Image: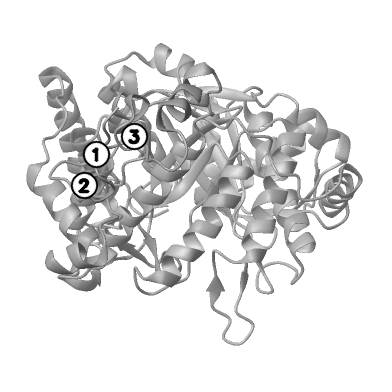
């Protein structure tokens, strides 16, 4: 068979890898991790961490700053100090309570096709959440605002690798605090049709956003109780404390069967012991106490174990992310969550101040730990910068590439007669090339992962096209997506009910800080 000259074959390959006008995304689907999780410690070592955590809760205890929560725990048999906020837990009480946590649950969205499975070997990615600043190449670093908030929501809706909300992608500080949660949730429900998130910052706020999630799905209160429709994260005040707004939210979410992710913020050397095992012991104690409390409020309420242990720079005291210590702590936290049969959450994080090489290699280090730990919710999956103080539009696109590549990595290899390629090897024989082989021509369009950001052209072609680096290309991509964005349809009756609820709650003053 006549073969195309080698140079022409290479030229056609370059054409296929040149940046395209449209972005080829991975599908919006349930990604399952087919690989065995990395176990970073032995079974005996894991048990030692578990037992040390129980010892912390028995001997030292944890502060619960809400009197209502202390009454709930006292009735359940916990040792509540009448003269302080300290609560100590018998290990039997902890083990009995956490036994009712569902190993998996479905988180529903207003678009039924966007429902997510949380638990098992499923992997779900969120946008960055809660930074006070937004940043991009054009506008620089600025305080979070409603315009940038909405634009991050648009990107989150557009990209399939963003599976669900993880919170406010940037804090909209131009909206008054008492009504911010109302406007933010309304934008979330109007600009996306994916699963939503509400902040556990007091009773009024959480009740408002639970009701808005119900309205957004167009379901009854009874159906909401059966079908988790909004989730939240509760960060403990490490070391060993849960504050009043968080506990109010935990109680109301658990009562309504809505999932709560308990995530200690344990920075080794600052809010936790300087060793990774010691920091994870404290993380585990705080997570177990919080999850046990949820189950005491409502046995069987969905809960997620959150791992967020990293370290600080001991020269400056600044948090460090994407470090080897972060990776080890993530893997150890995930291993503990599997021991308890809890769904697990971790994060795609870095400490860089710019969407540069440091941001990328630290994020990749985080992403590998997240994937190989069998994380179910990848928080801050897209856009995290500056140790979480800024949401970066360019980093969002860089992270889309990273997380899409991770999703492709999780696609199992198919081994059969067609993929083994013996016919192609026979056809080409020694000394040839495979560009024009029938096996290649039948498969080349979908044979490999197609990047949205990486530029695989040779140097000369890249230079002729403007010699744009990845950050500049990311800027162009996010701008194009926003220019072309169309919001998902929302039933007019649902929109009217949502607007009426928001207007009514604003007239009532919203939710002043408690």
Residue carrying label 3: 26
Disc 2, SS: helix
Q: Is residue 178 above or below residue 434?
A: below
Mark 3 or 2, which is nearer the eye? 2
Q: Which residue is mark 2?
A: 8
Q: How far apart are the two marked residues, 1 and 2, measured between alpha carbons?
A: 7 Å
Mark 1 falls on what kind of element?
A: loop
Task: Please provide percent x and percent y for residue 374.
Answer: 61, 38
Are the residues at dot 1 and dot 3 in contact (C-beta closer than 8 Å)? Answer: no
Question: Residue 485's image quarter?
Answer: top left
In the image, taking residue 267 as reference, residue 98 lies left or right, namely: right
Toward the viewer: 111 or 199? Answer: 111
- Residue located at (25% from left, 63% from top): 144
CB-based contact (under 8 Å), mark 1 and mark 2:
yes
Question: Residue at label 1?
Answer: 4
Label 1: few (<14), some (14–19) or many (≥20) C-alpha neighbours in 10 Å: some
Toward which corner of the image does residue 393 lie, by quadrant? bottom left
The CA distance from mark 3 to mark 2 is 29 Å
Judge depth for marks 1 and 3 and give the one in front: 1
| Residue drawn 73% across the image and 62% down it | 279
* Lower position in the chain sequence, tag 1 or tag 3: 1
Q: Where is residue 310 shown, x and y percent of the image?
A: 62, 64
Residue 514 circle label: none
Task: Return the residue found at the far left.
Answer: 483
Query: Does residue 27 appear to the left or right of 248 in the view shown?
Result: left
Is residue 154 left or right of 409 when viewed as pictured?
Answer: left
Q: Is residue 27 visible?
A: no
Crowd tier of the residue under label 3, counting other residues whose Cα lies within 10 Å: few below 14, some 14–19, many 20 or above: some
């Amino acid at each position: 068979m006549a073969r195309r000259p080698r140079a022409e074959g290479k030229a056609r390959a370059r054409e296929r890898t040149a940046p395209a006008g449209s972005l080829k995304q991975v599908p919006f689907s349930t990604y399952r991790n087919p690989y065995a999780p990395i176990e970073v410690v032995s079974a005996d070592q894991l048990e030692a961490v578990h037992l040390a955590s129980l010892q912390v809760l028995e001997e030292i205890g944890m502060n619960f700053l809400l009197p209502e929560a202390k009454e709930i725990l006292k009735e359940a048999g916990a040792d509540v100090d009448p003269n302080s906020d300290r609560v100590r837990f018998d290990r039997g009480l902890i083990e009995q309570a956490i036994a009712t946590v569902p190993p998996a649950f479905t988180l529903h969205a207003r678009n039924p096709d966007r429902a997510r499975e949380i638990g098992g070997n499923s992997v779900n990615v969120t946008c960055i959440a809660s930074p006070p600043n937004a940043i991009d190449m054009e506008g620089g670093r600025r305080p979070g605002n409603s315009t940038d908030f909405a634009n991050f929501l648009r990107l989150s809706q557009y990209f399939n690798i963003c599976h669900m909300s993880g919170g406010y992608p940037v804090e909209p500080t131009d909206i008054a605090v008492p009504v911010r949660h109302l406007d933010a949730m309304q934008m979330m429900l109007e600009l996306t049709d994916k699963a939503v998130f509400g902040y556990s910052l007091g009773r009024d706020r959480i009740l408002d956003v639970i009701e808005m999630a119900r309205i957004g799905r167009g379901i009854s209160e009874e159906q909401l109780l059966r079908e988790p429709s909004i989730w939240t994260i509760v960060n403990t005040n490490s070391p060993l404390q849960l504050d009043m707004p968080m506990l109010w939210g935990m109680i109301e979410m658990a009562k309504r069967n809505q999932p709560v992710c308990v995530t200690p913020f344990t920075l080794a050397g600052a809010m936790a012991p300087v060793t990774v095992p010691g920091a994870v012991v404290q993380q585990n104690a705080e997570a177990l106490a919080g999850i046990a409390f949820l189950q005491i409020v409502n046995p069987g309420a969905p809960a997620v174990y959150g791992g967020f242990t990293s370290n600080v720079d001991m020269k400056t005291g600044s948090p460090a992310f994407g470090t080897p210590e972060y990776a080890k702590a993530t893997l150890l936290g995930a291993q503990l969550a599997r021991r308890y049969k809890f769904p697990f959450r971790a994060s795609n994080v870095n400490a860089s101040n710019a969407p540069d090489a440091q941001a990328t290699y630290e994020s990749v280090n985080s992403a590998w730990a997240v994937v190989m730990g069998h994380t179910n919710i990848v928080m801050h999956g897209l856009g995290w910068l500056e140790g979480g103080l800024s949401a970066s539009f360019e980093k969002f696109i860089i992270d889309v590439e990273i997380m899409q590549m991770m999703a492709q990595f999780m696609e199992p290899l198919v081994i059969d007669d067609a993929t083994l390629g013996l016919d192609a090897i026979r056809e080409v024989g020694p000394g040839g090339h495979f560009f024009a082989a029938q096996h290649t021509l039948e498969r080349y369009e979908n044979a490999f992962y197609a990047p949205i950001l990486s530029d695989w052209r040779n140097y000369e072609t890249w230079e002729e096209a403007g010699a744009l680096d990845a950050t500049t290309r990311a800027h162009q991509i996010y701008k194009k997506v926003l220019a072309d964005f169309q919001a998902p349809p929302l039933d007019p009756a649902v929109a009217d009910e949502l607007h009426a609820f928001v207007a009514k709650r604003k007239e009532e003053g919203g939710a002043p800080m408690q």
